[in-house]
């Protein structure tokens, strides 16, 4: 039975009030609520902080090895716009009880107009930049590092120890690699790394994979997206969480189709192998996983869909027990 608009609004009651009475007293503000989300991993508290999103305005070439109509179809299947790609940005704050740790820093003031909300959301979550003890980078793409130092050179976290994967530093700090970089996106990545880190590199700590980089936080190698791309396994007691960083970009595309290669991957084949390995592990072990590029709050669980595809089951928007 199809209800009329009046019945839908009034629950089928024979109301005598005019519909105008249900109109809002004020026009919509258009401003979203502060976007942060708390989770518990044993005694460790995680807070997901949104930095808004970016929009890749065309789908041609976004996936290197799939035709545009297949990409459009995959987006439409997830009720996303089919003519462009929306890319959310979400970092994690790890409160170990003794240390306040950031995993990546967002876009700062150099991202898309629809990004750059990180600091507002970070403060709304009850944090201050001066309280940050450590900043740990998963890799050195601009949407992860530009929040450390703004365009005018301001360093946002003056008390924090800065850490990055040794393999990332070896690649992005290499003058030989920079000289070979193709013009455009790749050359821009090298320039961005130099801008952010050259003035402070003497104070940056490098770390290897399979090491504890903060209390309860282990760096896990996940190469392909970049040579030193790193995930973070977070554990407290019997509880675990895996921050998978950029093993996928838009999850509607690359969780559902893990063989697809995003244009941002440095080595698409290694990235493909890594993506399958991590998604298979997450599904098998029923791991709670967090993504940098997934609809906020950007975490949930992975299930299998056939032999080569997966689904992301988002975490319900509930307060932790």
Image (spheres, rainbow, N blue to C red):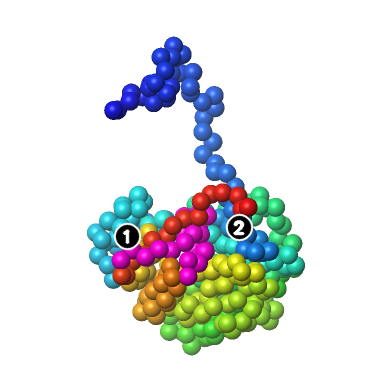
Q: Magenta stretch containing residue 47, yes or no?
A: no
Disc assigned to residue 39: 2
Q: Residue furthest bottom?
A: 176
| Disc nearest the viewer among 1 and 2 | 2
Q: Magenta stretch containing residue 300, yes or no?
A: yes
At label 1, counting other C-alpha atoms closer than 10 Å, the crowd grade (few under 14, some 14-19, many 20 or more) is some
Q: Is residue 257 visible?
A: no
The residue range painted magenta reads 285-306
Q: Is residue 91 visible?
A: yes
Depth order, front residue of 175/74: 74
- Secondary element under disc 2, as helix, strand or loop, is strand
Residue 296: image location, x then y, percent: 50, 54
Disc assigned to residue 59: 1
Residue 98: image location, x then y, percent: 75, 67
**Residue 104 quadrant:** bottom right
Residue at the (47%, 61%) spot, across then down: 301
Give left or right: position of 80 versus 314.
left
Residue at the (70%, 66%) spot, across then down: 96
Depth order, front residue of 266/46: 46
At label 2, counting other C-alpha atoms closer than 10 Å, the crowd grade (few under 14, some 14-19, many 20 or more) is some
N-terminal-most mark, 1 or 2: 2
**Residue 140 quadrant:** bottom right
């Amino acid at each position: 039975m199809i209800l009329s608009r009046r019945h839908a609004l009034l629950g089928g009651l024979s109301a005598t009030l005019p519909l105008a009475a249900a109109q809002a007293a004020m026009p919509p503000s258009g401003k979203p609520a502060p976007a942060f989300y708390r989770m518990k991993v044993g005694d460790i508290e995680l807070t997901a902080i949104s930095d808004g999103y970016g929009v890749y305005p065309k789908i041609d070439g976004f996936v290197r090895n799939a035709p545009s109509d297949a990409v459009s179809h995959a987006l439409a299947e997830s009720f996303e716009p089919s003519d462009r790609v929306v890319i959310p940005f979400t970092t994690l704050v790890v409160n170990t009880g003794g240390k306040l740790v950031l995993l990546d820093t967002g876009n700062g003031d150099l991202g898309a107009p629809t990004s750059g909300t990180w600091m507002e959301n970070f403060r709304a979550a009850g944090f201050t930049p001066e309280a940050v003890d450590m900043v740990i980078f998963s890799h050195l793409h601009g949407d992860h590092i530009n929040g450390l130092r703004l365009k005018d050179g301001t360093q946002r976290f003056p008390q924090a120890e800065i850490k990055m994967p040794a393999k990332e530093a070896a690649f992005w700090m290499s003058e030989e690699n920079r000289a070979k970089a193709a013009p455009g996106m790749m050359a821009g990545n090298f320039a961005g790394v130099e801008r952010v880190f050259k003035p402070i590199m003497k104070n940056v700590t490098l770390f290897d994979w399979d090491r504890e980089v903060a209390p309860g936080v282990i760096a896990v190698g996940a190469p392909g997206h970049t040579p030193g791309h790193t995930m973070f396994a977070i554990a407290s007691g019997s509880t675990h969480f895996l921050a998978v960083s950029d093993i996928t970009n838009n999850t509607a595309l690359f969780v559902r189709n893990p063989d697809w290669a995003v244009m941002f991957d440095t080595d698409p084949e290694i990235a493909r192998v890594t993506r399958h390995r991590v998604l298979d592990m997450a599904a098998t072990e029923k791991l709670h996983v967090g993504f940098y590029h997934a609809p906020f709050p950007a975490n949930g669980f992975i299930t299998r869909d056939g032999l080569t595809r997966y689904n992301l089951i988002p975490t319900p928007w509930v307060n932790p027990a």
